[in-house]
Every structure is written in C-alpha cells, then in structure tokens.
Amino acid sequence: MLQPNIWKNVFIYRRNRIYVVFEKLVDKVMSAEPNVRFVIVLDKNGNKVGSKQRDGTKNLLPPQEFDKSLEHALNAWKFRSSMKDYLGKNEYVLAVYDKIRRFTIPVDDEHIMLVTLDNRGGQKDLIDRIMGILEGDYTKPISTGPQN
C-alpha cells in the first residue's frame, strides 16, 4: 500500500482526456522559449501546485508583493470568468510591463497558469506554443527560438 505522502507533490489535471502532471506541464512551458523566466500553476483557492524559475533569473518583486500579485491575478481571473456568458471564454490575459510580460492562462476550470517572460522574444509565438501544450497538440514546435 502506498503512503499518502508519496503523492504529496503530484497534482494531475484532465484536459482533452490527457492526464498531465503539473510539474511536467511547468517543465514543458519553461522549455518552450528561452526567455520564459517563471511559470506557476495555481488552483482556484490560490494554492501553488507547480512552479519553476529559470536558473539565474532575479526576482523582481519582494516575496510579499509577489504573493499579492498572484492573489490579484487569481481574483481578476475569477472576475473575467464570471463574464463568459456575455463575452465568451477568456483564452488568456497579457500584462505588459517595462521589464517583463506576464500571461495568465487557464489550465482547466480549476487552475490557472502564470508565465512571465522577458521582453526579448515573440509573445504571440510563445502563447501559441503554450496553448498547443495545454490542448495536447504536440505538433506545434516547442522551441524555435526568437523570431526575426
């Protein structure tokens, strides 16, 4: 019999009949583009269920402000989701700052993913690759590098 703590960090979601471990999802997104700085997956209660920061990446927010930022992103997503009957399903949100870009993307009805990247790469290409990963379309290129 398995001990419960063996599965402590394993979180599985279902999307299009494909089961993926959140940490593997985070790894795939991190490898999608070299300018991805950070990826985190939150459940609808704000619990962190998977995350990774690129080696050598400096945190731009102090820990307390980082937590506030996650809380704000989650609450904003909940609000946007409440508008879907009027506006349709929210595909993703892009916040553009001087130093970074941050995507908020639904993983499923219970989880969102936040992806931050520096300002060097093509955001449209990256979001297409991330959406392909989430939709199970592994034919989309995972890493093509910056587009000229």
Image (cartoon, rainbow, N blue to C red):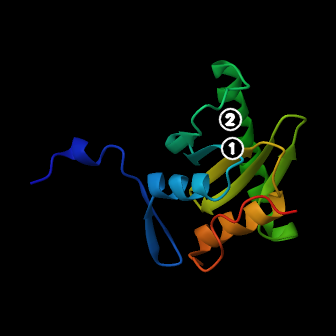
What is the C-alpha distance between the residues marked 2 and 1? 5 Å
Crowding at dot 1, Cα within 10 Å, few <14 / some 14-19 / many 20+, comes out as many
Question: What residue appears at the point 53 percent right and 42 percent down from the top-left corner?
Answer: 51
Question: What residue appears at the point 63 percent right and 59 percent down from the top-left corner?
Answer: 32
Work out which residue is located at the far left of the displayed protein and give it.
1
Residue 64 versus residue 23: which sits nearer the camera? 23
| Relative image position of residue 123 (x, y in whole percent) | 82, 57
Left or right, residue 109 beside residue 68: left
Mark yes or no: residue 91 visible.
no
Disc marking residue 104? none
In the rendered view, would you say 118 is above or below 133? above
Mark yes or no: residue 93 visible.
yes
| Relative image position of residue 80 (x, y in whole percent) | 79, 55
Using the rendered view, name the quadrant where residue 138 is placed.
Answer: bottom right
Q: Secondary structure at mark 1?
A: helix
Question: What residue appears at the point 59 percent right and 51 percent down from the top-left corner?
Answer: 30
Residue 44 versus residue 67: which sits nearer the camera? 67
In the rendered view, would you say 107 is above or below 6? below
The quadrant of the picture occupied by the C terminus is bottom right
The quadrant of the picture occupied by the N terminus is bottom left
Disc marking residue 71? 2
**Residues marked 2 and 1 touching at CB (< 8 Å):** yes
In the rendered view, would you say 85 is above or below 99? below
Amino acid carrying label 2: it is Glu
Q: Secondary structure at mark 2?
A: helix
Work out which residue is located at the far front of the displayed protein and give it.
148
Question: What residue appears at the point 80 percent right and 69 percent down from the top-left corner?
Answer: 85
Amino acid carrying label 1: it is Leu
Residue where numbered disc 1 is placed: 74
